[in-house]
Image (cartoon, grey):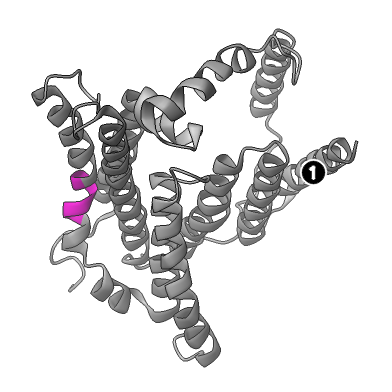
């Protein structure tokens, strides 16, 4: 009961913060609100017992990416440029995307239902991981051992993003001196 | 901001616990929540915090740019090397069973090394992005 109340409260706050991010014109305020959003999201993940994801969300979403946004802000302007006229197209795209997502939502199994794949196949991993890998945390065992290929792909994505940003943003030699 | 004594002293006190917590998340990932990705971000956040308060130069003394350029691909290479080592020992790619004298120890070693690779790549990529932003001046 209390979990449901907390979840609903967090979702309401998420909605309010989202509206704030869309409405606010000062980009500095928008960045701070994005950090607030990430912390609310992390709390929501804790309520859903996904502590790993919550940790990542708090560290990446609220911590490091806020710094990156502030760094980007210090290179550009801090106030959003006023629009010349009302734009219908972005609203249309957003409404259609939201509609498609809501339509897809109706096909998902009910939240917490025993028919979900995680409840049908998860027990298998829980039973196998300790005798096969000796790792108590099943999430780690699945990520690094059973799904090692996926994690290699993710690491490669981080690597690719890193060298991509370095190639784009790095100062050329000699540019700093002039 | 460079002269703010409170911020500088507070940062110095925060730095060691942050790095220690990153190591805890890294090495305790087998038992509790955590792992290479989370630990890498936390450790990078510690260095970035230091850089925010003390400036880019002191931060680059701790983690030089040249080191980052080795670590970013180095982490991926460690990951792939663990996979290839499994192949050389007669398993499939990224199968850790033969890395040690029995399969459970092999799994533990494999997961440990793979997480080290993830940690290095995430840690150095985050810092490299921060350096790239902080090293530029407004044109």
Residue B92, compared with residue B83, is above or below; it is: above
Q: Position of residue A87 (x, y in %)?
A: 68, 31
The quarter of the picture where the C terminus of chain B appears is bottom left
The residue that appears at 66% across and 58% down in the rendered structure is A26
Q: Position of residue A84 (x, y in %)?
A: 65, 42
- For the image shown, how many numbered marks are present on the structure? 1
| Residue situated in front as seen by the camera: B9 or A88 | B9
Q: Quadrant of residue A145?
A: top left
Residue B30 visible in image = yes
In-image side of A139 versus A51 (left or right): left
Q: Position of residue B72 (x, y in %)?
A: 23, 48
Q: Badge 1 is on which residue?
A: A10
Mark 1, secondary structure of its residue? helix
| Disc 1: CA contacts within 10 A as few (<14), some (14-19) or many (>=20) | some
Residue A174, compared with residue A19, is above or below; it is: below
Q: Quadrant of residue B67?
A: bottom left
Magenta stretch bounds: B69-74
The residue that appears at 53% across and 24% down in the rendered structure is A126
Is residue A128 magenta-colored? no
The residue that appears at 44% across and 36% down in the rendered structure is A140
Q: Position of residue B46 (x, y in %)?
A: 43, 67
Q: Quadrant of residue A135?
A: top left
Using the image, name the chain to which the residue with label 1 belongs.
A
Magenta: main secondary structure = helix
Q: Residue furthest left?
A: B88
Residue A147 visible in image = no
The residue that appears at 74% across and 20% down in the rendered structure is A112
Is residue B72 magenta-colored? yes
């Amino acid at each position: 009961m209390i979990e449901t109340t907390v979840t609903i409260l967090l979702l309401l706050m998420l909605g309010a913060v989202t509206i704030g991010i869309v409405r606010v014109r000062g980009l500095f305020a928008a960045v701070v609100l994005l950090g607030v959003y990430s912390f609310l999201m992390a709390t929501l993940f804790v309520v859903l017992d996904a502590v790993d994801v919550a940790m990542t969300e708090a560290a990446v979403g609220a911590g490091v990416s806020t710094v990156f946004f502030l760094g980007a802000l210090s290179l550009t302007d801090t106030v959003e440029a006023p629009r010349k006229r009302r734009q219908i197209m972005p609203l249309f795209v957003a409404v259609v995307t939201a509609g498609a997502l809501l339509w897809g939502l109706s096909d998902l199994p009910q939240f917490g239902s025993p028919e979900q794949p995680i409840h049908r196949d998860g027990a298998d991993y829980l039973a196998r991981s300790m005798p096969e890998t000796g790792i108590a945390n099943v999430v780690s065992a699945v990520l690094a051992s059973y799904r090692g290929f996926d994690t290699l792909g993710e690491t490669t994505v981080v690597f690719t993003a890193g060298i991509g940003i370095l190639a784009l943003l790095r100062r050329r030699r000699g540019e700093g001196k002039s | 901001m460079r002269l703010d004594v409170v911020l500088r002293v507070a940062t110095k006190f925060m730095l060691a616990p942050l790095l220690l917590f990153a190591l805890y998340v890294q090495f305790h990932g087998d038992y509790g929540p955590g792992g290479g990705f989370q630990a890498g971000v936390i450790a990078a956040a510690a260095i970035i915090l230091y850089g925010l308060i003390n400036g880019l130069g002191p931060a680059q003394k701790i983690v030089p740019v040249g080191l980052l350029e080795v670590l970013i691909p180095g982490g991926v290479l460690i990951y792939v090397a663990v996979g290839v080592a499994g192949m050389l020992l007669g398993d499939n790619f990224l199968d850790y069973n033969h890395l040690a004298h029995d399969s459970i120890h092999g799994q533990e070693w494999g997961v440990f090394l793979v997480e080290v690779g993830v940690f290095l790549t995430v840690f150095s990529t985050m810092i490299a992005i921060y350096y790239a932003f902080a090293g530029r001046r407004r044109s």
